[in-house]
Amino acid sequence: MARTIGFLGPLGTYSEEAALLYDPTSGNPYPTIAAVGEAVVSGEVDEGIVPIENSLAGSVIPTLELLISQPKLFIRGEIDLAIEHYLLAKPGTNPASIKVIYSHPQALAQCREYLEKNYPQAEQMASLSTVLCVTDSFESPVPAAAISPRRASELYDVDILDQGIQDVATNVTRFAVIGLSDHTPTGYDKTSMAFTFEEDTPGSLYRVLREFGQRNINLFKIESRPTKQYLGEYIFLMDCAGHREESPMRDALSALSQPIDMLRVLGSYPRWNPEA
């Protein structure tokens, strides 16, 4: 039986492109990242595709919060997708008249320098996706444009005002494949985890990182997010090389006791390999 995939919709988003790259046979759009997660948890779909990190704008916070708050979800894969943003508008729109530019907050952030240089007077308005922003621009009472994928120009009757408007040419978004379990070891894996400390004491983070450094485990990323419980209390998120079921990652995770208060492995999964 073919697996079903949910992705952040609507049709035409970069999430759909990532889903088609992962599995071109099946895909269902959902309105929010949280809705994709709910569809996976309920069994409505087998797996979900959600953006988790961009090379320009950093982490996608709603995805991190979904993974932290929903213990039934795990990362079981990743997809790296090159991003090229297009500036679209209603047919006949004069670029000099544009007063508002709509897009997803991540896309607006990725085109910040372009917008400041070319449309310094235009108001930037957040939309739910890089495709819904096209309809938002259509409904605007003043001349407007949208930052979208090229595919959106195929779905809507629009003029392409500009293309490749992202601030850095090598703009890549990493998408997480989420499911009810993570992936079996492949020999070329990554493990994502979240942890908190029982007390805010000097050297706490060092003692955690030491367990990985002593075992020559490569650390890809570490960042912190507020726990949303107390001011100044944080949850740390970390990506490392290796699989939780294999040494040395298994040994490092086993060694994490004090000063760790909570440890949750968000998933072990194959690192993205476009040739695979």
Image: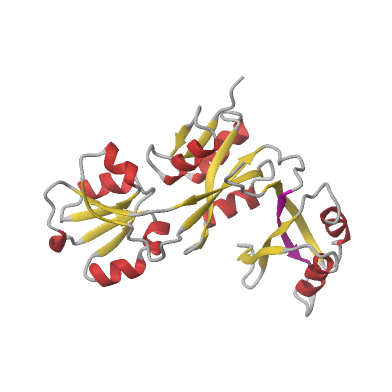
Task: Verify whether residue 16 appears in magenta.
Answer: no
Left or right: residue 249 compared with residue 103: right
Residue at 59% over, 23% down: 2
Q: Position of residue 112 (x, y in %)?
A: 35, 67
Residue at 27% over, 48% down: 136
Name above or below for residue 92 compared with residue 24: below
Q: Where is residue 16 in the image (x, y as percent from the top left)?
A: 45, 39
Q: Position of residue 29 (x, y in %)?
A: 45, 35
Left or right: residue 146 compared with residue 53: left
Which coloring applies here?
secondary structure
* Count of numbered circles on the image: 0
Residue at 66% over, 49% down: 271
Left or right: residue 158 compared with residue 197: left
Image quadrant in which you'd find residue 23: top right
Task: Verify whether residue 193 appears in magenta.
Answer: yes
Main SS class of the magenta portion in the image: strand
Q: Where is residue 102 in the image (x, y as percent from the top left)?
A: 29, 55
Left or right: residue 103 compared with residue 5: left
Name above or below for residue 203 compared with residue 56: below
Q: Nearer the viewer, residue 225 or 166?
A: 166
Q: Magenta span covers which residues?
A: 188-198
